[in-house]
């Protein structure tokens, strides 16, 4: 066996894509310690028990998904990337995984701050959020057991939440095909899913609550070859399936958990916590754009049958994840906050956006996939994000960080700003063409 070093000096479209993505992720590096949550302390104390309960559970759930992404997804995608000639793809995936690990730390920070600043609120005492907060407040420096027990409360809830566990199993099964070649056979034995040819303007798409239940996902053995000739031979579709899964997991599943923090921020509450979510969202936009570009480039040379197999697989998986996320949302107190309908629109919006990263038409029509515009505006508030990063430089007091724009309300990112970091720590503005992976 010959061990080959990574060569970042290669030229070509794939090498350029890897290098650009890695440079952007390096320039966008951040930690939750950069964002001071002191200004949110009073807001946290003013939250209702229902709001606090929803937030701690949402953040714990997001941590679970991103933990899976940093582990199982990275292992599967890295194994696939080992077959790529550039070699640098594995380094980019490592950077993505590092970002996801930072996200999990940020969620834990938010949960801890919510508990520390809980105080007393009106309404009925809640056994999850309430006892969690009171345990944190009563813990002393020498009484770490109470604090640890309290900190486990929302995470324990996620472990015991069957809807969340089903969603994680669905994702893990898709990634596990990298190891055993088995299909991710999550099937509720109901009717077929929605028409994957449908677009946002199609009249034959049902409302979200009427969409048929998930399909079983196509096996990797359906490689789309019409014959065994060299001309028709295509790469293992498992690689494409895992790329599609990674994009859907981030852009559909994770981003759908951002609604409540952004809704609160749109009302002037927890605005610094919202900055953390914006930083996470910026990372997801970057990684989803990158992985989606890799997916489309690998899909392009395949024959029509293989492309149709992947199209059907991707829409089936999006449908499965939509249903799992919808079921999970019912276990959160959105209805008590009168936000249930709009969170469902936000979920549909994110499903469409995730598919756009992969180059596919939207699944839901515009009339049922347009969430509260104030929430979208908050998520895309790059001015707030820029101010936050400049005031909390990671490496030095004056260090500047460029920021990439979040995805637009219509779908994929419309414009971005990247940096070309030099010894003098200068940032270079880039155009939309620089992100045309």
Image (cartoon, rainbow, N blue to C red):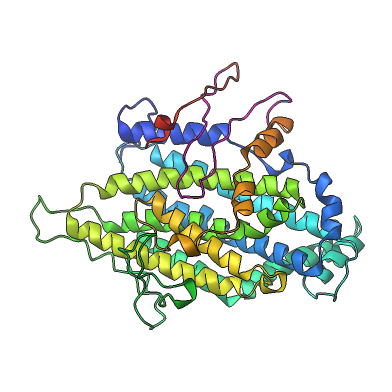
Majority SS type along the magenta span: loop
**Nearer-the-camera pick, 177 or 224:** 224
Query: In the rendered structure, does residue 421 fall within the stretch colored magenta?
Result: yes
Which residue is most to the top?
A: 424
Residue 97 visible in the current orientation: yes
Q: Quadrant of the C terminus?
A: top left
- Answer yes or no: is residue 83 visible: no
Tell me if residue 396 comes above or below residue 357 in the rendering. Answer: above
The image position of residue 421, as x and y in percent, is 54, 23
Q: Residue at x 42, y 75 (%)?
A: 211
- Residue 8 is inside the magenta segment: no
Residue at (35% x, 61% y) in the render: 314
Q: Is residue 354 left or right of residue 384?
A: left
Q: Nearer the viewer, residue 338 or 350?
A: 338
Residue 342: x percent and y percent?
60, 65
Residue in view at x 31 percent, y 47 percent: 296
Residue 204 x %, y %? 35, 70
Quarter of the figure that contains the N terminus: top left
203 or 6: which is nearer to us? 203
Q: Quadrant of residue 160?
A: bottom right
Relative to 279, residue 161 above or below: below
Q: Is residue 12 above or below residue 222?
A: above
Q: In this rendering, would 88 be left or right of 312?
A: right
Q: Quadrant of residue 391?
A: top right
Residue at image location 29% in from the left, 38% down from the top: 85
In the image, which residues are magenta? 394-422
């Amino acid at each position: 066996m010959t061990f080959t070093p990574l060569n970042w000096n290669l030229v070509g479209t794939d090498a350029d894509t890897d290098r650009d993505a890695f440079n952007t992720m390096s320039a966008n590096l951040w930690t939750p310690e950069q964002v001071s949550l002191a200004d949110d302390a009073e807001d946290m104390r003013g939250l209702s028990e229902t709001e606090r309960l929803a937030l701690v559970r949402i953040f714990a759930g997001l941590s679970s998904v991103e933990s899976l992404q940093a582990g199982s997804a990275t292992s599967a995608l890295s194994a696939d990337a080992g077959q790529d000639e550039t070699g640098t793809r594995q380094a980019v995936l490592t950077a993505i995984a590092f970002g996801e690990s930072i996200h999990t730390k940020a969620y834990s920070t938010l949960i801890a701050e919510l508990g520390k600043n809980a105080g007393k609120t009106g309404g009925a005492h809640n056994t999850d959020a309430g006892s969690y907060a009171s345990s944190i407040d009563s813990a002393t420096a020498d009484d770490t057991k109470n604090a640890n027990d309290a900190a486990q409360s929302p995470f324990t809830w996620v472990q015991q939440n069957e809807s969340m566990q089903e969603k994680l199993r669905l994702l893990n099964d898709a990634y596990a095909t990298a190891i055993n070649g088995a299909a991710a056979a999550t099937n509720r034995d109901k009717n077929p899913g929605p028409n994957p040819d449908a677009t946002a303007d199609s009249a034959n798409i049902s409302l979200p609550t009427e969409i048929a239940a998930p399909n079983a996902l196509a096996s990797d053995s359906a490689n789309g070859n019409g014959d065994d000739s060299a001309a028709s031979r295509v790469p293992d579709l498992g690689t494409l399936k895992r790329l599609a899964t990674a994009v859907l997991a981030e852009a559909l599943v994770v981003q759908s958990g951002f609604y409540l923090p952004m809704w609160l921020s749109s009302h002037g509450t927890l605005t610094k916590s919202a900055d953390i979510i914006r930083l996470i969202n910026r990372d997801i936009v970057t990684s989803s754009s990158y992985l989606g570009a890799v997916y489309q480039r690998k899909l392009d040379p395949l024959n029509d049958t293989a492309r149709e197999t992947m199209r059907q697989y991707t829409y089936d998986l999006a449908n499965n994840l939509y249903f799992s996320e919808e079921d999970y949302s019912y276990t959160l107190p959105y209805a008590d906050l009168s936000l249930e309908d709009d969170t469902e629109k936000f979920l549909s919006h994110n499903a469409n956006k995730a598919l756009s990263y992969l180059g596919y038409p939207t699944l839901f029509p515009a009339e049922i996939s347009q969430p509260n515009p104030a929430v979208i505006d908050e998520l895309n508030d790059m001015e707030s994000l820029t101010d936050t990063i400049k005031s909390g430089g990671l490496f030095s007091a004056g260090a500047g960080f460029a920021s990439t724009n979040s995805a637009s309300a219509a779908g994929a990112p419309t414009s971005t700003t990247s940096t070309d970091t030099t010894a003098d720590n200068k940032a270079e503005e880039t155009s939309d063409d620089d992100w045309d992976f």
